Image (cartoon, helix red, strand yellow):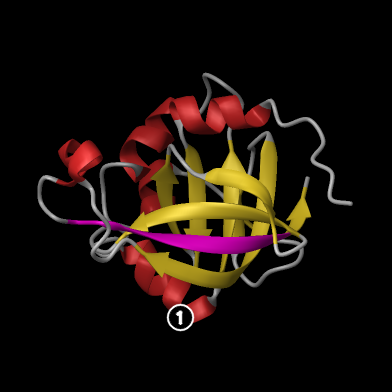
Amino acid sequence: MNRFENMDFMNSAFNTGAFVTSGGNVMVASWGFVGVMWGKKVFVAPIRDSRYTKEMLDKTGEFTVSVPAAGTMKKELAFCGSKSGRDFDKWAETGMVKKPAKEVGTVVVDGCERYIECRVLGVLPMGDMDISKVANWYANGDKHNFYFGEIVAEY
């Protein structure tokens, strides 16, 4: 049986943002899904086609989610949520510190309240999905890909 302990941190992640890292790149996500699929604990990370993180995820097949305590790291979240890793060294610009992940070959953001480490099980592109009811989120056509990551560590 898969059990999730103390999921309160997800309120912070989905209301103020969490850092998603892959291949050393860091971005901000404020939505995602946690659950059980295929008998495994899974985090589903929606990543847009245009994001540099998508390139890193496709190369490495792994990612981490670093959730700051509610109300903290506001400047870092704002910067990393508005700039691309293609154009900026977000670590240097914000002063955030990389910390090696425990089970995957990328990093987490030091100083956060909670960490999730994942290995990608599969990717589901939005493709031709009917988005008429949520079209306001896709005005420029930049759709998401849903990365299903097996949670291999959480702490």
Would residue 155 be counted in the magenta stretch?
no
The furthest residue to the top: 71
Residue 81's place in the image compared with 120, above or below, is above
Could one spot residue 23 in this view of the protein? no
Q: Position of residue 146 (x, y in %)?
A: 44, 59
The furthest residue to the right: 1
Q: Answer left or right for 33 relative to 139.
A: right
Q: Position of residue 13 (x, y in %)?
A: 54, 33
Q: Position of residue 7 (x, y in %)?
A: 71, 31
Residue 15's place in the image compared with 118, above or below, is above
Residue 116's place in the image compared with 50, above or below, is above
Could one spot residue 34 in this view of the protein? yes
Residue shown at the point (18%, 43%) measured from the top left = 132
Q: Position of residue 36 (x, y in %)?
A: 70, 52
User: Which contiguous range is marked in magenta?
Assistant: 142-151
The furthest residue to the bottom: 59
Q: Main secondary structure of the magenta part?
A: strand
Task: Name the amino acid, label 1.
Answer: Lys
Nearest the viewer among 113 and 57 is 57
Nearest the viewer among 15 and 97 is 15
Q: Quadrant of residue 118?
A: bottom right
Q: Quadrant of residue 61?
A: bottom right
Q: Please, what secondary structure does the residue beneath circle 1 have?
A: helix
Q: Residues within 10 Å of mark 1 (few under 14, many from 20)?
A: few
Q: Quadrant of residue 37?
A: bottom right
Q: Quadrant of the C terminus?
A: top right
Q: Answer left or right for 31 relative to 65.
A: left
Q: Which residue is mark 1?
A: 59
Residue shown at the point (58%, 49%) measured from the top left = 65
Nearest the viewer among 19 and 135 is 135
